[in-house]
């Protein structure tokens, strides 16, 4: 995903869920972050402080859009998100995204329908 910051392979506008699953090398399983979040078993969803989110986790923000938002956790309190800094682009961002979360905690999971992500 880091390579996509300076050398995007496409316009990523509104493709947050797609960017995350492609970064993880996974096939599609939901048309939006909201649907992916709703398909995730409740026991697999966590709502914790930034420092407790493992790198590689899928993060979800459920505010401010119809489709919600997904982004990928990086290291040291950062992540990778589309449309946060630049529309249609992937950028390194703070892990807690004020535009999509209601507090400084992050909703995240290591679960996918294809198995758990190894962080």
Image: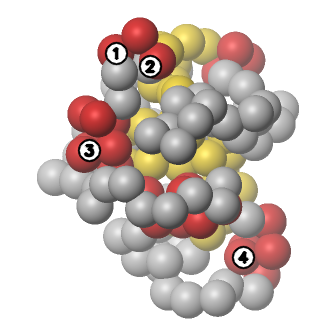
Q: Label 3 to label 1, Cα distance in Å?
A: 14 Å
Badge 2 density bin: few <14, some 14–19, many ≥20, Cα 10 Å: some
* Dots 1, 2 in contact, CB < 8 A: yes
Badge 1 density bin: few <14, some 14–19, many ≥20, Cα 10 Å: few
Above or below 2: residue 92: above
Q: Residue at x 37, y 54 (%)?
A: 29
* The C terminus - image quarter: top right
Query: Which label sits in the foreground, 3 or 1?
Result: 1
* Precedes in sequence: disc 4 or disc 1: 4
Q: Label 4 to label 1, Cα distance in Å?
A: 31 Å
Q: Label 4 to label 2, Cα distance in Å?
A: 27 Å
* Dots 3, 1 in contact, CB < 8 A: no
Residue to which mark 4 is pinned? 4
Q: Residue at x 70, y 14 (%)?
A: 52
Q: Label 3 to label 4, Cα distance in Å?
A: 23 Å
Badge 4 density bin: few <14, some 14–19, many ≥20, Cα 10 Å: some
* SS for dot 4: helix
* The N terminus - image quarter: bottom right
Q: Quadrant of residue 28?
A: bottom left
Q: Can the viewer see residue 114?
A: yes
* Precedes in sequence: disc 3 or disc 4: 4
Residue to which mark 2 is pinned? 45
- The picture places residue 83, in percent across and down from the top left corner, at 47, 66
Residue to which mark 1 is pinned? 42
Above or below 83: residue 81: above
- The picture places residue 78, in percent across and down from the top left corner, at 73, 40
């Amino acid at each position: 995903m880091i390579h996509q910051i300076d050398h995007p392979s496409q316009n990523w506008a509104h493709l947050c869920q797609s960017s995350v699953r492609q970064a993880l090398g996974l096939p599609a399983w939901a048309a939006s972050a909201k649907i992916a979040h709703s398909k995730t078993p409740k026991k697999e969803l966590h709502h914790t402080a930034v420092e407790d989110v493992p790198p590689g986790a899928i993060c979800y923000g459920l505010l401010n859009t119809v489709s919600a938002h997904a982004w990928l956790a990086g290291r040291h309190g950062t992540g990778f998100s589309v449309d946060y800094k630049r529309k249609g682009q992937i950028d390194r961002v703070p892990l807690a995204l004020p535009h999509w979360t209601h507090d400084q905690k992050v909703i995240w999971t290591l679960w996918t329908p294809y198995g758990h992500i190894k962080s």
